[in-house]
Amino acid sequence: MRRTSADYHPVDVHVGSRMRQRRSLLGMSQSTLGKAVGLTFQQIQKYERGANRMGASRLFEFAAVLDVPVAYFFDELPVGAVHTRVPKSGADAVRAMSARPALDVLSQRETLNLVREYYEVRPDALREKLFDLIRSLARDSRWSHKPAKMAAGSAIRASRPKRS
């Protein structure tokens, strides 16, 4: 029986998402990946969406081309994924996929481009300084927000009557 458009299996969606993430991180197009394994870019799109299920040999081929172990595709798989389904179309599918915030941040094009460009910075000592700068900016940003919150909280506490 042919699969209906009702839903995709969440494991297929996750594996496809991991494949897209790795391909993007390497700066590889869908066409390039497809040629490497003897598929069209449309077939790669279907695998990345989770519309097509992947056999063990195909998964092994993708792992070899993308230079990752097969287990990479299953990393961060949500615990309940095996027992649930993700809707295929519309806003429901978007909401279901965005229920995984950690993976979403890692698979955003901006994040992947940033990581790819970061590793292009040479020499390594300069890249380490860039990392230290970013970490410092993030810490300063977090710190600058805390005093305002603490001040507001202090005002609330100050207005409460003291218990005896």
Image (cartoon, rainbow, N blue to C red):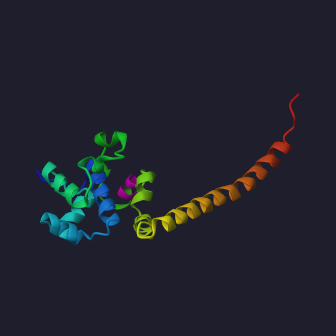
Give the left or right position of residue 2, taking residue 26 as reference: left
Residue drawn 41% across and 70% down? Answer: 120
Residue drawn 25% across and 60% down? Answer: 66
Name the quadrant containing residue 145.
bottom right
The one of 129 and 140 positioned closer to us in this rendering? 129
Q: Position of residue 72 (x, y in %)?
A: 29, 50
Q: Verify whether residue 95 appears in magenta.
A: yes
Task: Inspect this view and state whether residue 146 appears.
Answer: yes
Work out whether 82 lies above or below 137: above
Work out whether 10 lies above or below 47: above
Q: Position of residue 77 (x, y in %)?
A: 34, 45
Task: Inspect this view and state whether residue 10 appears.
Answer: no
Give the left or right position of residue 162, taking residue 136 as reference: right
Give the left or right position of residue 156, taking residue 70 as reference: right
Prevalent SS, magenta region: helix
Q: Residue furthest top?
A: 164
Name the quadrant containing residue 47.
bottom left
Residue drawn 23% across and 49% down? Answer: 70
Q: Verify whether residue 59 appears in magenta.
A: no
The one of 35 and 3 positioned closer to us in this rendering? 35
Residue drawn 41% across and 66% down? Answer: 119
Q: Quadrant of the C terminus?
A: top right
Q: Position of residue 124 (x, y in %)?
A: 46, 65
| Highlighted range, magenta | 93-97
